[in-house]
Amino acid sequence: MPFIQNRVLAQKIAGIWIISLTGVWVLAAYLNVFEAPRALLETITALNWIVLTIILYVTLPKGMWSICFIFLAVVGVFHIGLVLANSVDGITDDDILYQISRWFYNVETDNAIHVVNLAMIGFSLSAILFSSPAPQLDDQQSTNLAYRKRLFNLGGVLLALFVVIFFAITVLTGAISSYGAYLEVMSTNPLYSLIFSYLYFFIGIAFVFVCVSYAPGFGYLYFVLFAIWALFAFKIGLRGEVMFPSAVAACMLGRKGAPIRGWLLAVLVIVFLIVTGIVKNSRVSGDYSGDLGINPLNAVAEMGSSLRAVQETIKWRKNDNFQLLAGGSYWAPLERQFALFIPQLERIDVEQDGRLLNIVVQKKAGPIGFSAIAEAYINFGEKGVIVVFFMMGWVMARLDSSATTIRNDILIGVALLPIFVTIRNSFIHVPVQLILGLSLATLLMYLGYKKSDTFIPTTQTG
């Protein structure tokens, strides 16, 4: 046991040391201590992401199945994927090359790449510093399989309900035919945008219940149902709507142990990237009539275009004299809710409230989504990005280190859903969805409990 403890400590110290060295190189490039032309900067950035993910994989107690690792991997895909693909000349899709030609090769994008590197360093350093093994609870008779089965079926029934509603709306409106039709429905009636947003959220909540409460012998029906929905959603051209609840589900399954072998995960990732590359054609042209291609780096590059949101915020400050919000976009959704009940608080019109970054980016750049890194930057600048992502690393490390229980894991999974969505969206919906999601999850757990359950299940098994 002392040997194991010393080994874990040595790995953590080595990881912190390597991240610190990497951080020195990243900061040196950012501060122009040495000249870093675009090609070198892209190589440094790609290597930075790869090195950080390897360190977290080796150092964190749960490795690749930890919340910290999965979050860093997803953030990297959406912010560094384009940089990585371009650094090895791996982009072969003419549509992608055309799309990025309008923004990817300018000075603001160089600055955006630096900012992303700072965020990744801050998050990784914090994740390792504050990570620790989760307490091991005894797997005893208090694990009530009947209660878990009720929660499993409750989540599955809700999943089926929301999936049926999704198909009903997309079929009736014609949105199921293509991504272009989906966008047209959303733009024609803003109510549909709100409905779809919460449908995806509720599907995520239901799937969290299924994943957390699952035990061997419960069957795979609800997992198959989610997979069918995901395939149709992907066919339409939706990515993040499928990826984020899937990533959270991986976090929850990983808290019970590695759900699948590493080689199988690698195969699934490659297949996913190929399918995503095909979906890209739907997102750009509105159908699947063009060259479908199977180059997985095209998919990595297309998803990595969330870097543009960071580039846009840098451009706002440089060209539009856009002042830092000093936390305004994080406070605005709460203030606007309070203003509904407190007459003294002014509720600014959404079109005039410059703190609502989903509205601001739509006006300035169009429907490009947003980014948690861009949000931190436009609020607090470069230093604030490091601080915000250091704090996020601390929070997720504490979640990783918390006890694995039915109640705890459900609440963690539900809370992570809106947080993962901010990887390529604004913060505006997070407070409401946190309150709504946690309240709904608590209610569902209460409904699933019976007085005949002598013990509320705590320890995960299987």
Image (spheres, rainbow, N blue to C red):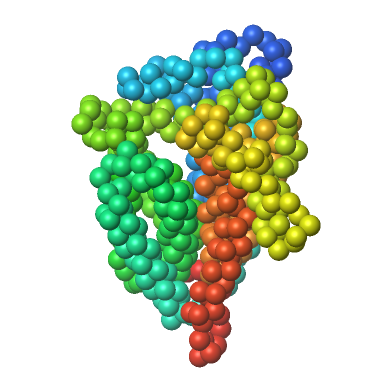
| Residue at image location 67% in from the left, 20% down from the top | 318
- The single residue placed furthest to the bottom in the displayed view is 452
Instruction: Examine the rendered structure and indicate whether residue 116 appears above or below residue 211.
Output: above
Left or right, residue 14 beside residue 45 = right
Instruction: Examine the rendered structure and indicate whether residue 421 appears above or below residue 86.
Output: below
Q: Quadrant of the C terminus?
A: bottom left
Q: Quadrant of the N terminus?
A: bottom right
Picture mark count: 0
Residue nearer the viewer, 168 or 14: 168
Left or right, residue 159 beside residue 176 = right
Residue 430 visible, this angle: yes
Estimate the x, y position of residue 328 in percent, counting from the top left.
72, 42
| Residue at image location 62% in from the left, 22% down from the top | 315
Can you tell which quarter of the image residue 16 is in?
top right
| Residue at image location 47% in from the left, 35% down from the top | 367
Estimate the x, y position of residue 317 in percent, counting from the top left.
68, 24
- The single residue placed furthest to the left in the displayed view is 289
Estimate the x, y position of residue 286 in percent, counting from the top left.
29, 35
